[in-house]
Image: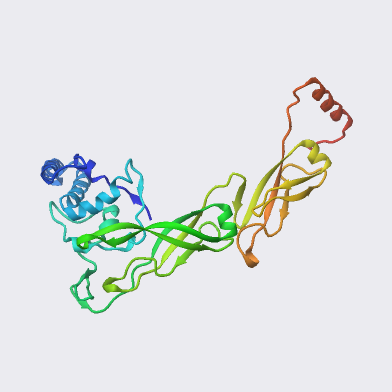
Amino acid sequence: MSVEYKDYYKLLGVSRSASKEEINKAFKKLARKHHPDLNPDNPEAETKFKEINEAYEVLKDPEKRKLYDQFGSDWEHGQNFQPPPGYENMNFSGFGGAGGFGGGDFSDFFETIFGGGFGGGTRFTSGGGFQDQFGGFQQGPRRGSDSETTISLTLEEAYKGGSKSISVQERATGPGGNPMVQSKNLNVNIPAGIRDGQKIRLTGQGSPGPGDGPRGDLYLKVKIAPHHLFKVEDNNVILDLPLAPWEAALGARIKVPTLEGRIEMNIPAGIGSGKKLRVKGRGLGNGARKGDQFIRIMIQSPKAGTEEEKKLWKELSEASDFTPRNF
């Protein structure tokens, strides 16, 4: 899941190096300007007021600001924010409750990083148990949340499968118990024939569990990159094969690329543009659902550049009784 990135510094009109005093001063000035009670006829005032309140809620707190700054420089210029695996299900309730002017009602971006409910959710205890949002205490560890991220594959990697090394981001605990993001490398076994949109499950590589509980699972959603030769339609692979008019008219034997290397193929005489020839079992998928490769004929006509070429084309047109149109 991606959400719209919020530039809290821009919302308050301060630099990323602004001091706490500068942030406080900027917030108070903007809060007075956009307070809904002072702008009863401006429906946009409440929205603006909520945005600056959210920005202040983060930047006034050293811990929240530190966590936010880990993301800020990577998602500038209005790009969508894609949290690292695990963040979509985590709740950083240990940061405390909302304060300032009319707290609460935060954006999806805020809740993605700091957790929904802000001040609710799960609070960990030194005894290894956890305290839920209703104040009840439960003993023992719990399984962590499952996470999902995208893995990009070439068409060849998806077709052949095999081992692939990837780097993913995960939530971790830094010095002083502060939350942080860190990279880890994983070796992933790509199943041969995997298709775009399918998921690979990595057991125990998701979010850590409360109270030293087991980790959840990490799901890798496959995204197959565009290929310079082949197109993919469901389980099948399509190759456009350019032919000269005489190859199409007379037939030819041509070396054709496939995902397993080139093969020699007989092109029947008189074949038309758009006709498809099938190479069985050279598509994606596996077993009974394994697809094929289709060779789509694309007849390319050369330009008659010389007088001799024009003469030959004219002689051919006069000698042939072929009619391309029947209407």
Q: Is residue 111 visible?
A: no
The x and y percentages for residue 192 are 58, 62
Q: Is residue 143 left or right of residue 150?
A: left
User: Which of 121/254 is in front?
Assistant: 254
Compared with 143, 255 (above or below) is above
Compared with 315, 264 (above or below) is below
| Quarter occupied by residue 174 | bottom left
Q: Residue at x 73, y 42 (%)?
A: 273
The x and y percentages for residue 92 are 24, 62
Which part of the image, by quadrant, shows the N terminus? bottom left
| Quarter occupied by residue 250 | top right
Which part of the image, by quadrant, shows the C terminus? top right
User: Which of 163/322 is in front?
Assistant: 163
The x and y percentages for residue 152 are 48, 53
Q: Can residue 135 be seen in this view?
A: yes
Q: Is residue 267 left or right of residue 163?
A: right
Compared with 145, 100 (above or below) is above
Most extreme residue toward the right is 319
User: Which of 43/182 is in front?
Assistant: 182
Q: Residue at x 80, y 37 (%)?
A: 246
User: Which of 55/62 is in front?
Assistant: 62
Q: In this view, does 255 lie to the left or right of 137?
A: right
Q: In this view, does 194 lie to the left or right of 14?
A: right
Most extreme residue toward the bottom is 139
